Amino acid sequence: MQTPIILTGDRPTGKLHIGHYVGSLRQRVLAQQTHRQFVMIADLQALTDNGQDPAKVTGNVLEVMADYLAAGLDPAKTTFCLQSALPALPELTCYYLNLVSVARLERNPTVKAEIQQKGFERSLPAGFLVYPISQAADITAFRATHVPVGEDQLPMLEQANEIVRRFNGLVGQEVLTECQPILSDTGRLPGIDGKAKMSKSLGNTIELGMSEAEIKQAVHAMYTDPNHLKLSDPGQVEGNAVFTYLDAFHPDKALVAEMKAHYRRGGLGDMRCKQVLNDCLQNLLAPMRERRQQAMSERGELLNLLRQGTEQARGVTDSLLGEVKRAMGLNYFG
Amino acid sequence: MQTPIILTGDRPTGKLHIGHYVGSLRQRVLAQQTHRQFVMIADLQALTDNGQDPAKVTGNVLEVMADYLAAGLDPAKTTFCLQSALPALPELTCYYLNLVSVARLERNPTVKAEIQQKGFERSLPAGFLVYPISQAADITAFRATHVPVGEDQLPMLEQANEIVRRFNGLVGQEVLTECQPILSDTGRLPGIDGKAKMSKSLGNTIELGMSEAEIKQAVHAMYTDPNHLKLSDPGQVEGNAVFTYLDAFHPDKALVAEMKAHYRRGGLGDMRCKQVLNDCLQNLLAPMRERRQQAMSERGELLNLLRQGTEQARGVTDSLLGEVKRAMGLNYFG
């Protein structure tokens, strides 16, 4: 049986936050025990919509590496790698570009939604339109069998698997491997302002490396129930960020259930709830902050970790590219 | 002063013919005396519209190499290289993809015309839409200052120069070099059937490697003036492929002028004209056929020439890619 291989990663456009932790990092820490796991820092992909500002991307590569170690990813179990240092990926992208029509790319629901969200319309960079093809190159280059995604990213995997079938059919060999999604069971964590998306640009995040005081301040500022004015009033738990976070992070589920009931019938104050959440987040983040500081104090070593992982990844991806080229007869020089 | 650098090449989708000879090969034989010249076999580009049939491309790489030597290109003066063996090209393509909008690509007149000509419409492969970007990668990777093109390809160079200015502006350095066209002064040679385009699929070509008998047969079948029925009739020279070819190939311009006048006033037969043309083409092609046979009888050596040139080209293109990545700050590992 084939060893399951996970490919996952992040665009290095900012430090990682607790939304990343519940949504993906936590799962990766578990998965590294049972799977061959590659975590790729997707700087090329980040450039598809930050082409005008490369420094935003390059300046965050080591930050994200430090966040990985902070979250508990172990370089002995997980292979970290850097997308731009893997030349097999653009090569595969160029081959796959010939197997997908422009019309098919324009129909991709994820791309459509993101084009709208980013307001690209007619100025859509070509690199953004074709990024599902570039993702297919990533996934297949690592022979990934499993890719963790949110529901909204499923069309990207479908596109990748289409390319796999198309290519294998074309060359009459099973060169590329189809992948399966690992769907996250947690919904997306809202920002501290209760807005749907935690995002650095909205200033509504709690980063993994925040200081004790910063975390406290963020929890203090957190969105609750705007109609819960007096302590004795009944409060609403739904859409109340404090309870969403308690659900996501507090280890004592019974305590959280009890607090919710109390809050609903009145008599439990926002301050008290925030204290409980603050204690819980401080406990969670203190060791991460420490590991992160340690990592950032040895930037040469951190870079070295990334370099070593990237060399391993290069072996894997170059080998797949070699198979692809052989299957197409493009191995003129042996 | 910068040494002028020429980048040129061919898509390996068939053997080269005398249309290639007058349109480009002849000029390259001269240019190799005065310029640093790279001649690239563009197998990747050929795959953008032959994605379903890679063998059509891979099977013609050595044929084209043999045609180059046949035409008089000298490996000591011209560097031959293979596009698919230069990984810097797809990497640069991926970076440039972020600098060009989809709308801009769709406006490219060359691409528009070719989309129509090839009947792609909605099934247009993404690779075909973005091939001006891939050409910009080729041109800039070699730091080409001069690119021989026909009028119809000028928009491709304009696109490449746009990318050069865009990228240099973005990084605030003159990393990439703008290129100039070398416009061919000869019109496109029609096929032997008088049709506008000489093309293998139309069966109206005279290939560089054809035997004496094949050349004779092709000249014999050549389109003349369909209204020139009797020897004594006045004949038309315009649109008469025999005279177009005599103009293109015959070294004695005075003789050709005299023949034209005679033909126009009547009394000069098609057979006689074809004899003169046949002699001229046999003289031109005999040494090419010999060099071609020699080259194809030592395929290992031929491949070796291509490999050596490609290694040289790889040095050049990798070095440019390194500069591009440094300028973007993507040189994490030094």
Image (spheres, coloured by chain):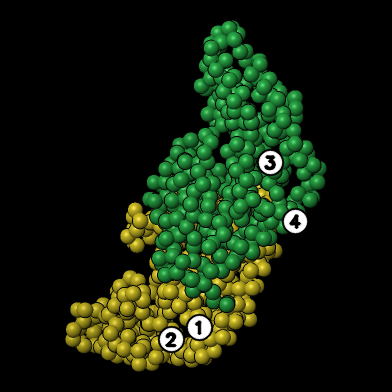
Chain colours: A green, B yellow
Disc 3 versus disc 4: nearer the observer: 3
Callout 3 and callout 1 share a chain: no
Q: State the residue in front, A140 or A121.
A: A140
Name the amino acid type tagged 4: Gly
Residue A30 position (above or below residue A237): below
Disc sitting over residue B66 in the figure = 1
Q: Secondary structure at mark 2?
A: loop
**Callout 1, which amino acid?**
Ala
Residue of label 2: B209
Element carrying mark 3: helix
Residue B276 appears in which quarter of the rendering?
bottom left
Residue wearing tag 3? A71
Which residue is nearer to you in this view: B1 or A283? A283
- Whether the residues at callouts 1 and 2 have beta carbons within 8 Å, the answer is yes
Q: Is residue B274 above or below residue B22?
A: below
Task: Name the mark on residue B334.
Answer: 4
Instruction: Give the number of the mark in front: 2 or 3.
Output: 3
Q: Earlier in the sequence, mark 1 or mark 4?
A: 1
Residue A101 visible in this rendered orientation of the protein: yes
**Marks 2,3: beta carbons within 8 A:** no
Q: Position of residue B116 (x, y in %)?
A: 34, 58
The local crowd at label 1, few if under 14, some if 14 to 19, many if 20 or more residues have their Cα within 10 Å, is many
Res A230 quadrant in image: top right
Residue at horizontal 45 percent and vertical 39 percent from the top: A113
Q: Is disc 1 placed on a helix, strand or loop?
A: helix
Q: Chain of mark 4?
A: B
Quarter occupied by residue B56: bottom left
